[in-house]
Amino acid sequence: MQDKYTSFAALEAGGEIAGRDYNTTVRERPQSGVLIVAPHGGNIEIGTTELADLVAGTQFSLFAFNGLKIRGRTLKYILGKVAARYVPPSILERPKEGFVLPANTWLRAALAPLVDDVLSDERLASHGLYDPEYVRALRTRFGAGDDALTFKVWTLVVFQLWFDEHQRENAA
């Protein structure tokens, strides 16, 4: 499959229309050295942009490509066209496989300040659902290298971000 989209300009020149076939979400935080990227947003991978937005919050920069177009049963049509320039057909046409995110590395390095803030005693006290002492011990063990706790820490962070957002919406 030959790629006809080598840039956003080529994408539009090829008949794909921003706002109809795709859109992007861009939020720059120049003071942040972290960019949260969601290249599979919109109809490509449902929920990706929303999750990336929650993780980025007001602290980190965000870029999301949101595919809005569905062609037949191919949700990733536009992404596939763009990727064809860089990826051999044998890779693009093979069956879908799972991908494990390096969440443990992210949560201990680039996202560590977010984890510390979001799982602070003060933030957890806003709802009282979790024992701050338990969460502190969990974070200490995770920080010391216990990768088996990655999903628990990630779940706590995502829940707390969701709770904070929901609480703000209800206050408005």
Image: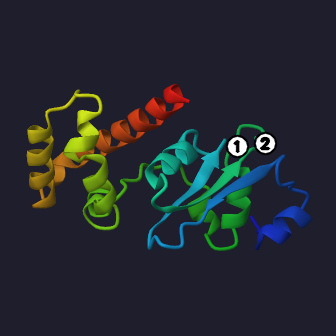
Front residue of 59/78: it is 59
Residue occupying image coordinates x 64% and y 65%: 89
Labelled pair 2, 1 in contact (Cβ < 8 Å): yes
Name the side, left or right, on which 55 lies relative to 26: left
Amino acid at circle 1: Thr
Residue occupying image coordinates x 44% and y 73%: 33
Front residue of 22/60: it is 60
Front residue of 61/42: it is 61
Amino acid at circle 2: Arg
Q: Which residue is mark 1?
A: 74
The reply to whether residue 52 is visible in this rendering is yes
Q: Which residue is mark 2?
A: 71
- Number of marks present in the image shown: 2
Front residue of 96/31: it is 31
The reply to whether residue 96 is visible in this rendering is no
Residue 32 x %, y % = 46, 70
Residue occupying image coordinates x 73% and y 61%: 81
SS of the residue under disc 2: loop
Residue occupying image coordinates x 45% and y 50%: 97
Name the side, left or right, on which 43 lies relative to 145: right
Tell me, for residue 3, which label it has, or none. none
SS of the residue under disc 1: loop
**Few, some or many residues within 10 Å of mark 1 (<14, 14–19, 20+):** few
